[in-house]
Image (spheres, rainbow, N blue to C red):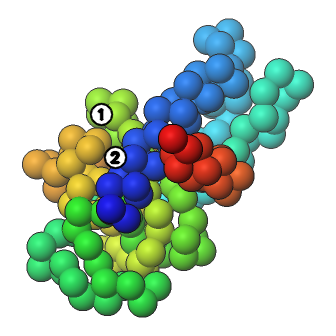
């Protein structure tokens, strides 16, 4: 039951964040200068200065990988056992419990995951996704994929958790 609720919450957040991002993002004429100045070395967090029309949040672009059955049941950095079917991830520096929207830059699919572990252990990668999270964004077969990470504000997660429990 708990896993089903967490999965439903993650799907709801993914859908809600896609709609919210499309409404608040710049149009093609506005994107030019802000996007060009937003380039950073691989894996660095970027904060674009907000303009009067929209507010931007920090994001990170780099290579993601996933981990699965070998680690299933082993303890994570948060102390909970790793469940390859949960929508979770390992990140080197974000606080444990942080929610992150991960977008596959090859196909545009995204998923919201909760950081519950530390990693990746391979240099040059910015996040390790659980098996199920990798499956949702269709990167499971490729092993590694270029992704964009966007922080999900805690208020959105709290509101979504409340609305999913309503009848």
Q: Is residue 32 left or right of residue 142?
A: right
Q: Position of residue 100 (x, y in %)?
A: 51, 55
Label number found at residue 125: none
Q: Residue at x 49, y 58 (%)?
A: 43
Contact (CB < 8 A) between labels 2 and 1?
A: yes
Q: Residue at x 40, y 42 (%)?
A: 11
Q: 109 above or below 74? A: above
Q: Please say whether residue 103 is visible from this viewpoint.
A: no
C-alpha distance separating marks 2 and 1:
7 Å
**Looking at the image, can residue 81 be seen?**
yes
Residue drawn at point x = 34 percent, y = 34 percent: 109
**Where in the figure is residue 42, as x and y percent of width and height?**
47, 55
Judged left or right of residue 7, residue 73 is: left
For mark 2, give the secondary structure. Answer: strand
The residue wearing badge 1 is 106
Residue at x 34% of width, y 46% of height: 146
Residue topped by disc 2: 146
Q: Quadrant of residue 118?
A: bottom left
Left or right, 74 with respect to 64, comes to: left
């Amino acid at each position: 039951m708990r896993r089903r609720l967490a999965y439903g919450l993650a799907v709801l957040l993914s859908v809600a964040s896609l709609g919210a991002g499309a409404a608040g993002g710049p149009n093609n004429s506005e994107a030019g200068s802000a996007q060009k100045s937003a380039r950073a070395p691989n894996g660095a967090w970027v904060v674009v200065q907000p303009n009067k029309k929209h507010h931007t949040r920090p994001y990170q672009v780099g290579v993601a990988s996933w981990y699965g059955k070998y680690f299933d049941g082993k303890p994570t950095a948060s102390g909970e056992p790793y469940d390859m079917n949960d929508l979770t991830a390992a990140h080197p520096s974000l606080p444990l419990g942080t929610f992150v929207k991960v977008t596959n830059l090859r196909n545009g699919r995204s998923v919201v995951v909760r950081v519950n572990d530390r990693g990746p252990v391979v240099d040059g990668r910015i996040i390790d996704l659980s098996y199920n999270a990798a499956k949702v964004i269709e990167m499971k077969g490729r092993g590694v994929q270029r992704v964009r990470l966007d922080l999900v504000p805690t208020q959105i997660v709290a509101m979504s958790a409340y609305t999913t429990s309503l009848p």
